[in-house]
Each structure stands twice: as structure tokens, then as C-alpha cells.
């Protein structure tokens, strides 16, 4: 039986055909970084093209033209050496050295070894090619850059020896091509600095808008935010301010409406309660008193749901101390085994009263439907998580989303809103989301339900 995997067993990796996903891992995620790449990438590409054209085309062309003049001088010196005899040759050689400003020397009876393969620069190759064209390929010659890098030695074989000419490098090629690079890099850095300065000023209003929207989503006040920047950014900022005003006005109107309804309904309920108090005791009056108390509790739940703690301001608080106080208060209101493992020192901007009510309600639910409960705290990434665990019957995974629906009570299994109107978990989740976090339900290690309040740090 073959040990190789079959075609159906092989897993296809879609990233193989999508290199863009691999590149995205190394790309900056912020607007400033991406905008900077848009500016830097074309500049780097342009410099690469200009450098290639300069060094591989223009520099080589200039070198060949300058080398052609030096090769013509060498050809003239060779003609003198082959045509005239001593001592006229020495006189002509000295005259040529003064006029051409070459350092000339002659070694009689010496031959040049055949050329060998070695790594040569662009200047050496261009010079060799031009000299070979001027004096012919049959005549042996050598070119070499001297150790000082400022002179080039050209040795040519004549009929009775070797003529050696030391030529300044600037006579053959551009003397300082690195000056061009420095000017190009220097100007690019200056332009890049100016671009970064202007880009930073353009991106800053967008970053402030993002921070303001994030703070408003977490229920924090943003009193000093004002639109500024480009026209499009100002329009987006003004739209954000308009949206914030509409949301705040909607919350205020809803709260005022429910508060008025609650007040209007409590007035006749108070009269009914007084009349019941004046009536002689009977099973019927006792039942009516319970109904009145139930209606008053329902009205309080409605008002609390409508208010949503929208008026409370966020303040820096010790999250550990706040959770511990809420847990102890819930434990006193509904006695039962309650384990609290919450450290101090975690400072966070929260709405203290709202968060305390959220934790208290969840602990009260845990003690109501379980024999014991536990409160714990941990940091997970950029979030602080408060866990409330119990050992009750729990909630089936398919019913956990329904448990958050307003005025909805579970019919099977564990009923989290026993004795209420179906707003307990809804209010708790609204409070968590008003902080920019969320309320999650999952299975508990204790066998029951785990309610997790996730708050951004």
C-alpha cells in the first residue's frame, strides 16, 4: 500500500495563489504608515531607475567617450615608438609626457603576458575595448587601477619593449559619481521630510476623529473634539458630532418618556397601596398587595432599562475593588457560597455605578440559579474580563442569544429572569456595551453558566 497521500487527502493552501495576503502581514495597518508607503515607494522606484540609467547607460557612454581620447593618445605614442629610433624617441616621449600630462616609462626587451580572466570594473572593460579598437587586437596590452584608486596604468607592447603610461583616472571617467548619489539622496531625504510633515498634519485630524468615535463608543465624554483639517475630514467630523447629538437626544427623550410613564403609573399604584393598607387583612388583599409590589418592581425594571446609565460620566476606578464591593453587596443581599478572586491595581475608565449594578445583577442571577458562585478576573489581550461562574443548570448554547432579548423569558431549562420581566441580562449587556465591551455567555468550569463581562483597557 502506498504511503504517499492521495489527491483528496492533500490540503490546498489558498495563500499559495494569493501572495497579496502574505505581503499584507508586513504592511503597516495605520493610515499614516500606508500613506507614507504611497509616497516613499514611487520615490525609491524613481531613484532606482535614475541610478540604473546613470550608471549603466550615461556613465558607461561618458566613460567610453573619454576613454576613446586616451586610447587615441596611446595610439599616437605607439606610433612614435615604432617609427622613430633613439634618441629621438626619448625626446618625443618626454615632450608627450609634458603635453599630455602622463607619467611615461619604457622597459626595453620586456613582453606582456597573455591576458587572464579576472573580475574587472566597468571602466577597465570600456578602456580595454576602446584601446583594442585603436591599436588592434593583435598587440598585447594591459590596464590596471593603481592602489591609490586615482590613477590607471596602461602598458602596451611595442616592437622592442613595453611602453607604460600612468593616466589620471578623471581623464577616463567621471571623477566623482558618488557626488551624484549624495545629491540625489540628500534631495530625496529633504523632500521626504517635507512630505512626512505635511502628511502628518493631514492624518492627525483623521486620527483624532477615530479616537473620538472610539471614546464615544465606550461611553466616555469627548468634550474637546472640534472638526478641522481637509474638507472631507471636516464633513466626516461634523457628521460624527451630529450623530452623537442625535443619539444623546434620543436616549434623553426615551429616559424622560419612561420616567414620566413610571411616575404616572406609580401615583395610582400608591393610592391602591394606601387603600389596601386601610382594608382589613384577608387572602384577597394580601394577593393584591403582592400584585402591586410586582407592578412596582416591573416599573423600576422598565425605567432602569430605558435609562441605560446614559447620564453617568466615566471615571478612573480600581476595577478590582469595584468588582469586590459589588460581589460582597450581592452576597449580602442573597446569601450563598461566593468565592471572590479579584486582584487590586487594575485602573480603568468606567461608569462605576452602572458597572457595579451589572456585576451585582449577574452575581444575583448566579446565586439564584446555583448553589454557589465564583467571581474571577483576568487580562486577555487588550481586554479586562470579569467572570461570574455558577454550578446551576446553565443555558443551552442555542438559547444563549435569546436570553439577551428584551422582555423575553426562557421557557425551558434555566430561566435567568425568574421573578422579573426579562430585562436582567439585557440591561447587563447594555451596560457592558456602553463601555465599549460586551457580555458573553458560555459554559462554566463549575458545571453551570459563565457570564463574562469584557471591557477594553
Image (cartoon, grey):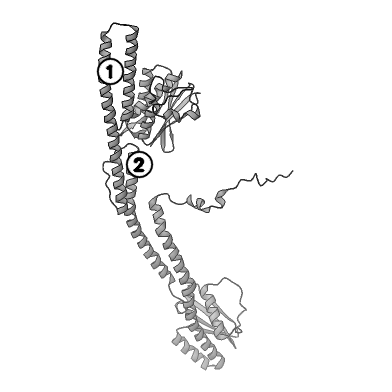
| Camera-nearest residue between 162 and 454 | 454
Q: Nearer the viewer, residue 327 or 98?
A: 327
Number of the label disc, if any, that sits on residue 441: none
Quadrant position of the C terminus in the picture: top left
Q: CA distance from mark 1 to mark 2?
A: 43 Å
Residue ID for mark 2: 214
**Neighbour tally class for label 2: few under 14, some 14-19, many 20 plus, Cα within 10 Å:** some
Q: Secondary structure at mark 1?
A: helix
Tell me which corner region of the image, top left, top right, bottom left or bottom right, holds residue 333.
top left
Check the picture and name the quadrant holding the N terminus. top right
Q: Looking at the rendering, which quadrant does residue 256 occupy?
A: top left
Mark earlier in primary sequence (1, 2): 2
Q: Which residue is mark 1?
A: 269
The residue lying at 40 percent from left, 64 percent from top is 185
Q: What percent of the width, then of the height, locates residue 213?
A: 33, 42
The picture places residue 143, in percent across and down from the top left corner, at 54, 78
Q: Position of residue 280 (x, y in %)?
A: 28, 5
> Image height check: is 385 above or below 138?
above
Residue 144 can be seen, yes or no: no
| Residue 130 versus residue 91 in the image, above or below | above
Q: How many marks?
A: 2
Q: Residues within 10 Å of mark 1 (few under 14, many from 20)?
A: some
Q: Is residue 232 visible?
A: yes
Counting from the top left corner in percent of width and height, residue 202 is at 32, 54
Amino acid at each position: 500500500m502506498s504511503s504517499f497521500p492521495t489527491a483528496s487527502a492533500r490540503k490546498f493552501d489558498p495563500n499559495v495563489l494569493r501572495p497579496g495576503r502574505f505581503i499584507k502581514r508586513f504592511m503597516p495597518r495605520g493610515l499614516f504608515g500606508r500613506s507614507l508607503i504611497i509616497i516613499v515607494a514611487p520615490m525609491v522606484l524613481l531613484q532606482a531607475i535614475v541610478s540604473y540609467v546613470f550608471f549603466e547607460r550615461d556613465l558607461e557612454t561618458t566613460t567610453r567617450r573619454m576613454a576613446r581620447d586616451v586610447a587615441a593618445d596611446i595610439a599616437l605614442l605607439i606610433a612614435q615608438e615604432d617609427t622613430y629610433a633613439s634618441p629621438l624617441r626619448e625626446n618625443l616621449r618626454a615632450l608627450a609626457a609634458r603635453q599630455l600630462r602622463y607619467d611615461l616609462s619604457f622597459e626595453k626587451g620586456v613582453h606582456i603576458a597573455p591576458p587572464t580572466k579576472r573580475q574587472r570594473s566597468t571602466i577597465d572593460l570600456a578602456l580595454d575595448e576602446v584601446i583594442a579598437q585603436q591599436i588592434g587586437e593583435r598587440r598585447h596590452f594591459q590596464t590596471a587601477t593603481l592602489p591609490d584608486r586615482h590613477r590607471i596604468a596602461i602598458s602596451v607592447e611595442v616592437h622592442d619593449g613595453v611602453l607604460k603610461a600612468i593616466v589620471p583616472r578623471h581623464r577616463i571617467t567621471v571623477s566623482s559619481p558618488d557626488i551624484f548619489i549624495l545629491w540625489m539622496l540628500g534631495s530625496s531625504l529633504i523632500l521626504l521630510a517635507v512630505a512626512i510633515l505635511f502628511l502628518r498634519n493631514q492624518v492627525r485630524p483623521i486620527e483624532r476623529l477615530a479616537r473620538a468615535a472610539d471614546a464615544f463608543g465606550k461611553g466616555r465624554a469627548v468634550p474637546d473634539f472640534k472638526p478641522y483639517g481637509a474638507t472631507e475630514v471636516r464633513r466626516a467630523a461634523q457628521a460624527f458630532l451630529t450623530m452623537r447629538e442625535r443619539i444623546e437626544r434620543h436616549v434623553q427623550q426615551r429616559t424622560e418618556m419612561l420616567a414620566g410613564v413610571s411616575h404616572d403609573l406609580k401615583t395610582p399604584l400608591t393610592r391602591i397601596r394606601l387603600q389596601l393598607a386601610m382594608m382589613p387583612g384577608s387572602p384577597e388583599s394580601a394577593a393584591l398587595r403582592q400584585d402591586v409590589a410586582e407592578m412596582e418592581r416591573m416599573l423600576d425594571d422598565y425605567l432602569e432599562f430605558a435609562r441605560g446609565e446614559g447620564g453617568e460620566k466615566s471615571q478612573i476606578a480600581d476595577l478590582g475593588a469595584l468588582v469586590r464591593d459589588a460581589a460582597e453587596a450581592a452576597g449580602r443581599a442573597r446569601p450563598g457560597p461566593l468565592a471572590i478572586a479579584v486582584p487590586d491595581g487594575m485602573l480603568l475608565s468606567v461608569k462605576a455605578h452602572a458597572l457595579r449594578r451589572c456585576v451585582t445583577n449577574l452575581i444575583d442571577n448566579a446565586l439564584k440559579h446555583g448553589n454557589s458562585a465564583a467571581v474571577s478576573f483576568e487580562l486577555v489581550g487588550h481586554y479586562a474580563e470579569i467572570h461570574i461562574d455558577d454550578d446551576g443548570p446553565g443555558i443551552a448554547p442555542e438559547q444563549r442569544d435569546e436570553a439577551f432579548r428584551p422582555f423575553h423569558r426562557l421557557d425551558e431549562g434555566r430561566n435567568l429572569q425568574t421573578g422579573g420581566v426579562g430585562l436582567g441580562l439585557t440591561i447587563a449587556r447594555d451596560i457592558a456595551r456602553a463601555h465599549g465591551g460586551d457580555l458573553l455567555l458560555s459554559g462554566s468550569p463549575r458545571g453551570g453558566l459563565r457570564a463574562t463581562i469584557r471591557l477594553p483597557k
